[in-house]
Amino acid sequence: MKTKRQIQKEATRKLILDTAYQVYADEGFSATTNQIARAANLSHGTIFVHFPTVENLIICLIERFGLEINEQFHLLSEKDESLETFLAAHISVLIRYEDFYKRLISEINVLPQEAKYVFINIQSVVSFHLNQVIERDQEKETIKEIPMHIVFNSWLGLIHYYLTNSYLFAAGSVLTDHKDELILNYIKLIRK
């Protein structure tokens, strides 16, 4: 059983992470821990009680995002879901983190190397699960014989293009507004 102090500590850590998602989404990864502390109504030192360095905070944010994607895809792979369901689930997770993810893909090169590795690991998880779905469909001969790296990079490239150029496509959430269109047309490209 958790003590009141442990519960409070977990709540504060969650508040810091939730606030950091928003601050980094709005301001970019150059935002300071002071900005995060102010937005969370916490003292600046509280950030470092929970995250010893800024790098650690950023890595924890990206890992938390990756865990949600991994959990979503693990559940789908157990259910033997369709390609459409898989792609919709991927977009649904990205919608929840859309502003943060948009910032992440546009600023990944300025992040610490370990954060880049965490991001690559997330993309590997997506690729692995997409590969499982594609292989099932290729066995049914409903998907063209396309190298997996092209299948994955085409999907990711499409998503990333829409996100980084969202001002061309939507006033609000580009993924919400174009989710069905993205899925339908991507599937048309790879289906026999």
Image (tube, rainbow, N blue to C red):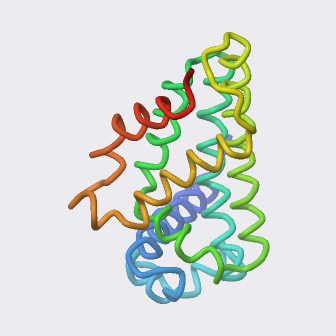
Left or right: 5 in relation to 187: right
Residue 156 position within the rendered picture, expressed as x and y whole percent measured from the top left: 57, 51
Q: Residue furthest top?
A: 140
Q: In the image, is residue 139 above or below residue 125?
A: above
Q: Is residue 184 above or below residue 2?
A: above
Residue 111 in the figure: left or right of residue 121: left
Residue 60 quadrant: bottom right
- Say which quadrant the C terminus sits in: top right
Please state the total of marks drawn on the protein image. Answer: 0
Quadrant of the image for the N terminus? top right
- In the image, residue 161 sits, relative to residue 150, either above or below, namely below
54 versus 116 height, above or below: below
Residue appearing at x 60%, y 62% in the figure: 9
Left or right: 51 in relation to 164 = right
Position of residue 186 measured from the top left corner of the image (x, y, whole percent): 48, 37
Q: Residue visible at 72% across and 70% down?
A: 115
Q: In the image shown, does 35 or 114 lie closer to the viewer? A: 114
Q: Residue at x 68, y 29 (%)?
A: 74
Farthest residue, direction left? 171
Which residue is located at x 32 percent, y 44 percent?
178
Location of residue 71 by image quarter: top right
Residue 34 percent coordinates (x, y): 48, 89
Front-most of residues 120 and 191: 191
Residues 41 and 159: in front is 159
